[in-house]
Amino acid sequence: MKILNCCLMEAEYNSIPDEVWEQKEEYRRFLPYIGQEKNVYDEAGLELTRRNLERMSGLTADVLFVTKENIRKEYQNLKAHGFSRIFQYVPEGEPAFMEAFEDYMREEAAPDLILAGQESACWRTGTTGAAMANRLQWPYFCNVVDYRIENETEVWIKQNTEEEVITATIRIPAVLVMGEAPEVRLKTPKRKDKLPFLHQSPQKKEMAGEPEETGMELSRRRASRDCRFITAGMCRKLLEKQGGGMEL
């Protein structure tokens, strides 16, 4: 089974103390660090994948970063944890995550399971996972705070919504949109585990302009699934009826 973790490197503004925002000179001191951290949703997805890699043999996991920052340290940590390939897409302007995702899908074998933080891209609108699922015609599940690979065709997930906590076993392929899991943070590997990767770098690709419109060809089985599938288009209509206010 192959897993793909999608990440957008960006600092969380709430990680900067409130009093700093009120002092302009102090605030400037923090500016060089903005844009060099994973958001908490992406990090939860990486840690949960790491736990599955540690628990099961036969799994492979790729990571797709969209960021202009130097991710050499992240690369070393993820390789030490057993992640297979780490890709870095460098956008010219605003991060266009779907462009990077489609480029990855054209060049690499299709994964069986995709993880994306609910703020991974699309300017924090939370629509990245839905867009990927709609593009692939896969089901997607929001607010996932834990998951475990059961076998080659099934994954156990835990969803934490405002109303209730839901656990279910789903069939793959599927897209999991990570919700808030405060206790789940990526484990720091030991230095001896990182040594083999200290002089290696992620596969890097510059995104200088708009890519040509090309379709994705996926030669893979279509698993039967007993779950509700909501396309991005259907979700937009639902949002319009409710006058916004609902977050994916």
Image (cartoon, helix red, strand yellow):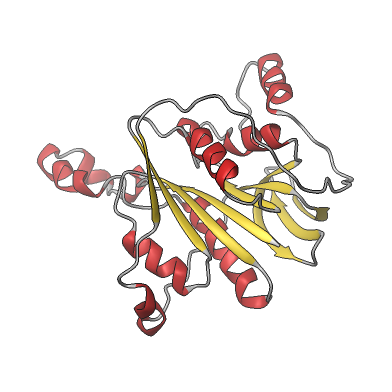
* Residue 183 is at least partly visible in this image: no
Q: Position of residue 126 (x, y in %)?
A: 56, 35
Q: Residue at x 47, y 28 (%)?
A: 211
* Residue 26 is at least partly visible in this image: yes
User: Of all residues shown, which one is farthest toward the bottom?
Assistant: 192
Front-most of residues 29 and 84:
84
Residue 58 versus residue 152 in the image, above or below: below
Q: Residue at x 35, y 81 (%)?
A: 191
Q: Position of residue 165 (x, y in %)?
A: 74, 52
Front-most of residues 217 and 174:
217
Q: Residue at x 39, y 58 (%)?
A: 202
Front-most of residues 158 and 70:
70
- Is 139 on the left-hand or right-hand side of 247? right
Front-most of residues 8 and 205:
205
- Is 213 on the left-hand or right-hand side of 229? left
Placement of the C terminus among the 4 image quadrants: top right
Placement of the N terminus among the 4 image quadrants: bottom right
User: Of all residues shown, which one is farthest toward the left?
Assistant: 25
Q: Position of residue 59 (x, y in %)?
A: 66, 68
Residue 50 versus residue 9 in the image, above or below: below
Q: Residue 153 occupies which quadrant of the picture?
A: bottom right
Q: Residue at x 87, y 46 (%)?
A: 225
Q: Position of residue 168 (x, y in %)?
A: 81, 55
Tally the numbered discs. Answer: 0
- Is 143 on the left-hand or right-hand side of 226? left
